[in-house]
Amino acid sequence: MRPAPDEAALRVRAATAADLAAIAALHTGARAAYHRARFPDAPFDLPAEQARWHDAWSHDLARDDTSALCAARHGTVVGAASYRHRAGHPPAVTLHQLHVDPGHWGTGVGLALHHACLRAWHAAGISRAALDVLWHNHRARAFYTRLGWRPDPDRRPAPDATHLTLTLDLATAQTPPAPAGR
């Protein structure tokens, strides 16, 4: 049974090393859930996958050019996002990861993480954001499309592409208000 959305109980904050195991587990579970839509019999949530994502998130948390956030509901980490600043002018950012525990899909966790990213990007004067999404992950593609992300006109996918690059013009994207009481 899916938990009821409870905005007051959802808190987005900077991720720390103490969140690493929970983030790796939810990332592994989310990847397994959306990959099963395409490959129903493949075991995407093996311990080796969790170790892989544990190492990746550990690396992200240690990078100076990467910010990581987590969303916690009643103290339990249920989502995570990371983004990397890209050198250049105008300033840009790549949304590197955004994952929600499948048991919390549709409860506002992804939206809260996305809004927190937008607020940080606007505050930092970032003008453009980009991300790569798996071509077959229709759920994620629809989520980003609803939020204003569009296919990058400069990076058309090859016929055998597994990913689609999306961009968001932050000059036109609305900055969501900060949650009350935070």
Image: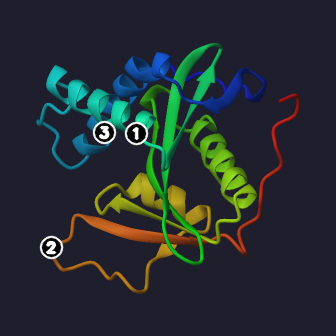
Task: Please give the label number shown on residue 60.
Answer: 1
Reading the image, the residue beneath label 2 is: 160
Residue at 23% of width from left, 40% of height from top? 36
Above or below, comparing residue 57 to residue 9 in the picture: below
Q: Answer few, some or many: residues within 10 Å of disc 1's Cα (few below 14, many 20 plus, some between 14 and 19).
A: some
Coordinates of residue 71 in the picture (x, y in percent): 59, 30
Which labelled disc corresponds to residue 31?
A: 3
Determine which quarter of the picture holds residue 58: top left
Q: Amino acid at mark 1?
A: Asp
Q: What residue is rendered at 59% in x and 21% in y?
A: 3
Element type at mark 2: loop
**Sequence order check, earlier mark of 2 and 1:** 1
Residue lying furthest right in this view? 181
Q: CA distance from mark 3 to mark 1?
A: 18 Å
Give amino acid for label 3.
Arg
**In the picture, which quadrant includes the C terminus?**
top right
Give the CA distance from mark 2 to mark 3.
21 Å
What amino acid is at disc 2? Asp
Q: Secondary structure at mark 1?
A: helix
Considering only order in the chain, which callout, 3 or 2, is on the residue closer to the N terminus? 3
Name the disc covering residue 158, or none.
none
Say how many tags the image has: 3
Q: Position of residue 16 (x, y in %)?
A: 52, 24
> x%, y% of residue 177?
83, 49
Q: Is residue 42 above or below residue 88?
A: above
How packed mark 3 is, by other alpha carbons closer than 10 Å (few <14, some 14-19, many 20 or more), is some
Q: Secondary structure at mark 3?
A: helix
Tell me, yes or no, whether the two marked residues, 3 and 1, touch with CB atoms within 8 Å.
no
Earlier residue among tags 3 and 1: 3
